[in-house]
Image (cartoon, rainbow, N blue to C red):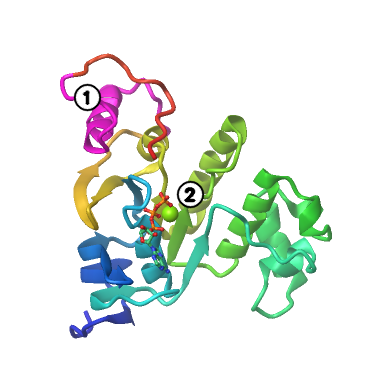
């Protein structure tokens, strides 16, 4: 581990993410209060939390798009981010978007696009892609950088339910194939339980809940304990009333 440096972002080889006492304020209002977070190499972590609690703020710090006011953040050098919208440049062909900022390697872009099932669309303009296809192109752009840390900020939020399920499976397949540590932000408790090794709940600017998810993969929503953990997380999010034992609706969006 590198030495402690206040407000610093450093590269680490020992763990994928190591955050100690990270704080961030905007116009005098503290959004992140002493966030502590460890993510092991190759671990899949999902972050839940009410709207406005600071999830994107934390992701931006990990991505290096913003800096903490105080605290220490250690992340790998190779990191990729996918946001809710694909953020493709409309005046560049799909394959050029995939290797944006990298050497113009058509073959390399093609391999990444094949992996997300978009090989046939490499020469198309981004404007001709559907929402789900655009997000797959964004995933290809993230993966072509061979990230050790993949940051996903509600990447499926704008997609229909069926496309969303397919994207979840795709992310799992890509995670297995490439092995990056993943930090996925979502409002969907079911999504968290289907994907994560560990689920975090952010509250009042810090990580309030940190629970391992030990269901065997491939996972099913009927696995023993699934409903109990789901209910516990909904309670932590303030959605399910304490003592409420009835199953809550399948797709539990929290905002
Ligand atoms: N650049 C900024 N300037 C001022 N305030 C900001 C800035 N970035 C974030 N904030 C504020 O910080 C708080 C947390 O924002 P953030 O985007 O991290 O929330 P979030 O948990 O990702 O919410 P959501 O689930 O709605 O995406 C919000 O109140 C937001 O207005
Ligand atoms: Mg957000």
Disc 2, SS: loop
Work out whether 115 lies above or below 158: below
| Image quadrant containing the C terminus | top left
Looking at the image, do the residues carrying marks 1 and 2 touch, with CB atoms under 8 Å apart? Answer: no
User: Hey, which residue is sitting farthest left in the picture?
Assistant: 243
Work out whether 104 lies above or below 181: below
| Residue 176 shown left or right of residue 24 in the figure | right
Q: Position of residue 179 (x, y in %)?
A: 44, 57
Q: Identify the image quadrant of residue 101.
A: bottom right
From the Cβ of disc 2, is ligand 2 less than 8 Å away? yes
Q: Which residues are magenta?
A: 218-243
Checking the image for residue 154, the label placed there is 2
Q: Identify the image quadrant of residue 21.
A: bottom left
Q: Residue at x 57, y 42 (%)?
A: 167
Q: Residue at x 43, y 70 (%)?
A: 63
Q: Residue at x 27, y 66 (%)?
A: 29
Residue 225 on the magenta segment: yes
Disc 1, SS: loop
| Residue 65 shown left or right of residue 93 in the figure | left
Residue 47 on the magenta segment: no
| Residue 193 shown left or right of residue 3 in the figure | right
Residue identified by numbered label 1? 241
Front residue (pair 107, 30): 30
Q: Position of residue 44 (x, y in %)?
A: 36, 51
Crowd tier of the residue under label 1, counting other residues whose Cα lies within 10 Å: few below 14, some 14–19, many 20 or above? few
**Residue 13 in sight:** no
| Image quadrant containing the N terminus | bottom left
**Image-quarter location of ligand 2:** bottom left
**Residue 158 in sight:** yes
């Amino acid at each position: 581990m590198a030495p402690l440096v206040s407000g610093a972002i450093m590269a680490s080889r020992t763990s994928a993410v190591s955050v100690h006492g990270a704080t961030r304020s905007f116009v005098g209002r503290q959004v992140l209060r002493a966030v502590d977070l460890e993510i092991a190499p190759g671990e899949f972590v999902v972050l839940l939390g009410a709207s406005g609690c600071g999830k994107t703020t934390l992701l931006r710090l990990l991505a290096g798009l913003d800096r903490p006011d105080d605290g220490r953040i250690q992340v790998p050098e190779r990191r990729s981010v996918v946001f809710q919208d694909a953020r493709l440049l409309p005046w560049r062909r799909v394959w050029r978007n995939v290797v944006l900022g990298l050497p113009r390697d058509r073959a390399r872009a093609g391999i990444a696009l094949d992996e997300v099932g978009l090989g046939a669309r490499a020469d198309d303009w981004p404007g001709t892609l559907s929402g789900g296809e655009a997000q797959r192109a964004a995933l290809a752009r993230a993966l072509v950088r061979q990230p050790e840390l993949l940051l996903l900020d509600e990447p499926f939020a704008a997609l229909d339910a069926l496309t969303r399920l397919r994207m979840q499976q795709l992310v799992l397949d890509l995670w297995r194939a490439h092995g990056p540590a993943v930090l996925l932000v979502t409002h969907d408790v079911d999504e968290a339980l289907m994907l994560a090794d560990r689920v975090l709940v952010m509250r009042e600017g810090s990580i309030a809940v940190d629970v391992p998810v030990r269901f065997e993969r491939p996972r099913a929503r009927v696995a023993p304990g699934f409903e109990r953990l789901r209910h516990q997380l909904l309670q932590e999010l303030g959605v399910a009333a304490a003592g409420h034992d009835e199953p809550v609706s399948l797709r539990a969006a929290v905002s």
